[in-house]
């Protein structure tokens, strides 16, 4: 029978929903901190807005704007600025309404899919299938459609994260084809806008493409802490209830994001996460304590994502180091230990190859470069040199992420043989100790 005397310890679902419906005491419009939100104003992007407006304005009169590139580190407002200008352009009272086709080359990544996406965005009814048509047929269909549907107007093709396309097979070729579209069109004209956060990606471009795409460009410099503060102040006015942010919260978010190359996305994420942490704790005020915790959480998320994306062999090296630390926290870990434990655990997972000492050393270097471990080289005198390995991230965090990797979850309790008192390893064979 249910015990009814325990009311105060039970989760009161009715009260929860009632409070929930009253709305957040922290946020008034949480979405305003989302990366897809386009604000009314973009502080500190005046010269970029002006450049893009000047380049694209002639489209309103039916003339062909030049192709150009936008460069800048991640989170410097490239995508937001292009979307902002395209919205403003669309709001103008002109007879000609330009088309904007937005392609994120990280998502729409093959030449075929790019052409199909352009076609399918313009054509409402007749669609190009996800695979199967020869490229020249799609091209012909696309040219016909552009002349028919876009007519005497301009079609902007925005290739965001264009560097990813250039690095892919067939990337240069499709870019070249797109820069040549106008030569085969009778009515419509197209204009290409490339966006990249790799400043050096032009080095991989075909010279014929540079001459038509890469000559005109605008740079988006990274924001400093003061600029980030202005951006956050404007967003916070929309996103938060009045007077819930302690005075130091925005300057702290801005300063932390400025340290990481002035990334506005990071600054907004910090502010949002800090607000959510305050909300979860049922605090009425967001304080620097929440920002610091938010920073820690975001860093951990980042590390977890990184580790989950590593190749299995690198994950196994990390697991080897973890297992030694877990079963013998005082043990000074050297590269030879990692080699031994790796060869034990890789044997527990079907199809995983034994690595040479040299490959293991390369993986150790990579993990160290990524800031997950530090590897200090020590001379062992007569015995040569070895690496002494330490973790730069918390063991709990590591345990959490490794156990979330399916193949590794099953070996998380493997005690390295050299730490098992009743076993001994000789020439890679494990024996039970007799005494
Ligand atoms: N000047 C600004 N004013 C207001 N918000 C901004 C400004 N610059 C950037 N942001 C906001 O910061 C976030 C990141 O900006 P955006 O997506 O445009 O960066 P990006 O330069 O395209 O980065 P990436 O190279 O990673 O794609 C977005 O939420 C955007 O609205
Ligand atoms: Mg972008």
Image: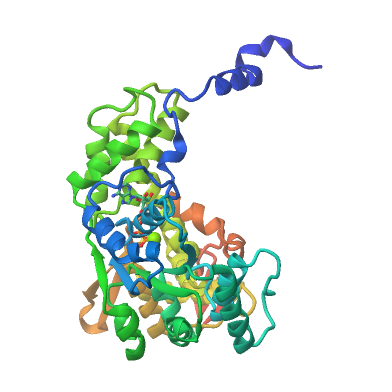
Q: Nearer the viewer, residue 423 or 351?
A: 351
Quadrant assignment, res 405:
bottom right
Q: How many marks?
A: 0
Quadrant assignment, res 226:
top left
Q: Which residue is rendered at x = 59% and y = 65% of the image?
A: 121
Q: Which residue is rendered at x = 49% and y = 63% of the image?
A: 99
Task: Tell whether 26 sits left or right of 114.
Answer: left
Query: Is residue 241 shown above or below 367?
Result: above
Protein image colouring: rainbow
Query: Is residue 2 shown above or below 321?
Result: above
Q: Quadrant of the N terminus?
A: top right
Q: Quadrant of the C terminus?
A: bottom right
Q: Nearer the viewer, residue 408 or 160?
A: 160
Query: Is residue 328 shown above or below 423?
Result: above
Q: Is residue 38 visible?
A: yes
Task: Tell whether 113 sits left or right of 277.
Answer: right
């Amino acid at each position: 029978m249910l015990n009814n005397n325990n009311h105060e310890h039970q989760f009161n679902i009715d009260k929860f929903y009632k409070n929930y419906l009253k709305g957040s005491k922290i946020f008034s419009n949480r979405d305003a901190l989302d990366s897809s939100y386009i604000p009314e104003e973009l502080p500190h992007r005046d010269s970029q807005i002006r450049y893009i407006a000047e380049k694209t304005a002639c489209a309103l009169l039916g003339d062909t704007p030049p192709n150009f590139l936008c460069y800048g580190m991640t989170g410097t407002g490239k995508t937001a600025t292009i979307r902002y200008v395209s919205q403003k352009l669309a709001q103008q009272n002109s007879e000609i309404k330009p088309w904007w086709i937005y392609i994120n080359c990280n998502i729409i990544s093959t030449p075929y899919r790019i052409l199909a996406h352009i076609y399918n965005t313009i054509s409402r009814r007749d669609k190009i299938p996800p695979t199967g048509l020869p490229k020249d047929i799609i091209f012909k269909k696309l040219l016909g459609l552009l002349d028919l549907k876009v007519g005497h107007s301009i079609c902007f093709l925005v290739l965001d994260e264009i560097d990813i396309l250039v690095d892919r097979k067939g990337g240069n070729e499709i870019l070249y084809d797109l820069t040549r579209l106008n030569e085969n069109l009778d009515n419509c004209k197209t204009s290409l806008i490339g966006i990249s956060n790799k400043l050096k990606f032009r080095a991989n471009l075909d010279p014929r493409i540079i001459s038509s795409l890469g000559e005109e460009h605008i740079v988006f410099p990274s924001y400093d802490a003061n600029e980030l503060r202005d951006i956050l102040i404007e967003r916070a006015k929309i996103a938060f209830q009045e007077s819930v942010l302690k005075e130091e919260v925005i300057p702290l978010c801005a300063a932390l994001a400025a340290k990481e190359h002035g990334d506005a996305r990071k600054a907004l994420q910090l502010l949002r996460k800090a607000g959510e942490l305050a909300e979860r704790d049922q605090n009425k005020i967001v304080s620097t304590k929440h920002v610091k915790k938010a920073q820690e959480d975001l860093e951990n998320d980042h590390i977890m994502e990184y580790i989950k994306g590593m190749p299995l062999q690198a994950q196994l090296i990390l697991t080897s180091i973890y297992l030694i630390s877990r079963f013998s926290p005082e043990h000074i870990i050297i590269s030879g230990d990692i080699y031994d434990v790796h060869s034990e655990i890789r044997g527990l997972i079907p199809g995983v190859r034994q690595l040479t000492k040299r490959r293991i050393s390369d993986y150790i270097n990579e993990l160290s470069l990524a800031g997950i471990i530090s590897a200090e080289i020590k001379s062992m005198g007569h015995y040569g040199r070895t690496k002494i390995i330490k973790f730069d991230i918390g063991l709990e965090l590591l345990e959490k992420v490794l156990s979330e990797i399916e193949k590794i979850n099953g070996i998380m309790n493997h005690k390295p043989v050299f730490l098992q008192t009743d076993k001994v390893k000789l020439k890679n064979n494990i024996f039970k100790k007799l005494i």
